[in-house]
Image (cartoon, grey):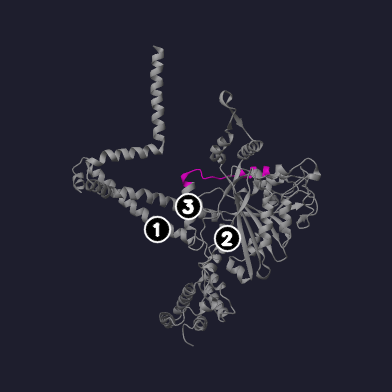
Amino acid sequence: MASHLRMFKDFFHHIGVFITEFFQKEESWVFLFFLATAVAVPFFTANDILNTVLSFIALTWWFWIFSPLFLLLRAVILYVRQERFKRSVKTAFFELNIPREMETNPKAMEQILSTMQSLRSAPRSIGDKYFKGKVPLWFSFELVSFGGKMRFFMRVPEENKGVVEAAFFSYYTDVELVEVNDYMDTFPKNVKGLHEQDKEIWGTEYILAREEAYPIKTYTHFESESEAKQLDPISNMLEVLGKVRNEETVGIQILAQPADSDWSEKWENLLTELRTPKTVDVGKGEDKKSVSMHSPGHEETLKEVEKNLSKPAFETIIRIFYVSPKDIFADSYIKSGISGAFNQYSSRNFNAFKSNSDAGTGIGGFKFFKKDERTNYRKEMFFYNVRNRMLPPESWIGKLLSSYLLASNFASKKFTMNIEALATIFHPPASFVLTAPHMKRVESRKTGPQSGLDIFGEEHEIEKFK
Amino acid sequence: MEIIQNIETLPWGNIFYLLRDLFIVLDIASLFLLIYFIRQALSMRPKFKIPKDHFERKEMLKGDKELIKRWSEIKKKSTLHPPQSYSLAVIEADTFIDSLLTRMGLEGKTMKEKLDQLDPEEIVTLKTLWRVHRIRNMLVHTAGFTLSEKQAQEVLDGYEMFLKELEIIET
């Protein structure tokens, strides 16, 4: 009896599985639709069908209009609110003064970034999202060369200032964080102003060449035990930027917005694909066997991808800009120098950086229609984004609404990069790099006062020293 | 189309019409809201009009008869009921000049922002305009400030010099 029961059970179970699988496939729905039409059509004339459809639409048009209208409205409102919010964020601008003697490696920067990632302020309620237009606040890490003098900057939301300062102080005891004025304010407001000062601008964005799941080569790949073999890829960047002429300004701006902590879930499929071993048939006839194969390179890729996905990440935008007087304007050195420096992080098995020139100041290959006006608009758009550290709008509608006819805002693209990679491309260089003469440095070592000293005065009087 | 007439006879016919009216109202409302927010969104775009040349800007409003008429009206009003009409005329003249600046394609919230974009070498009377605009500001913002006839005349003359330079009124 029991075996009969089980048989029935199995039978219905199989039917159940079949039905669920059947309805999950899009093809079956298409098939059903054709079947239904084929059955229904012989009973009606074409006129009948048309009439029914028309009267159905006449009766219910108000409903069908509503949903697309509402969705569109929602997207536009969200965009407007978010843009307002982004512009209203108060920020603090820091310069990182780096001492001559410093042993700390990028690992410390990674720790700081992981603290900063946890500051992610995602909207938690509908009110936050649609009325305040909250988006996670973003940071800006900048490496700027003023005529060959290198300076490190950081822009932080005012409300996160304390946490960031504390994090820096705990990992880089000797690095001084000094609040300074934004150097961008020394530039004119727009490219028109730059042109009036007889200056020209070039710029581009850098993005990852492959899927974000593949990591770039990080500092762990450059490290070694003996100090003589220590490499820091940032030194190449510093050398390139340090060689510009006196009147020129070159900068690398890395915008980083804390990403959701489940960012890696998007890449689950890729991971399973990588994990599935490739099988190869060996032997003939009776001896035929399937053997799973993994090349060592494949193993390594899998390992690196898993490691990459396991760390918290930032939504990143990397912008390069170059401003120079018109008569000595030569962007080819910067173009090749920067792309060479970024090329250090690439590897065939992993990922690489590439220039996203559509988001830069160039207009691409099509040069026949309104060339000057388009170039001008592109430059203005790029300079505006760099100057205000703007993140591109989230939605398609937002991108459309922030575009001009001659300069679209679609190309600028965020990509997710984990803290290890971010720490690799931006960190205070250790002392073995610091032999470079271009860096502005703090000469002497500074320490805090000993604890437990008597403090004379009231709380409010010591406020300003905090 | 027969179905439409039949709906009223159905038991849920009333609800159907109620729903329909409700949705039509919602449709119209969201359409208007959509237009409103799209206009807001477009106004938030960074503004970088390819700028008009200064020379071109100077000659933009040349020979507009409507402007001559409005200016002579303002001047006429100033003498109607002294001394209050002096202050009124000065304020009105300032608003008039401000609207001209906007029409010339200068952007900015206040007149100061607009004037900052003009080149003093290009427009000779810019300094005078600044001076009289300051007098007008004092008039508006300082309590107890009274404008004498002489001062009022000076301010209006200052504005007129600017208009003359733009060749809106003839010298």
Residue that numbered label 2 is attached to? A382
> Toward the viewer: A248 or B28?
A248
In the shown orientation, is residue A127 left or right of residue A440?
left
Q: Which residue is mark 3?
A: A396
- Residue B54 sits inside the magenta stretch: no
Per the model, the C-alpha gap separating discs 3 and 1 is 17 Å
Under mark 2, the amino acid is Phe
CA distance for labels 1 and 2: 28 Å
- Considering only vertical position in the picture, is B15 above or below A356? above
Q: Which residue is mark 1?
A: B35
Q: Are marks 1 and 2 on the same chain?
A: no
Query: For the point 41% across and 36% down, which residue is it?
Result: A25
Residue A116 drawn in magenta: yes
- Image quadrant of residue A11? top left
Q: Which residues are magenta?
A: A110-127
A172 shown above or below B166: above
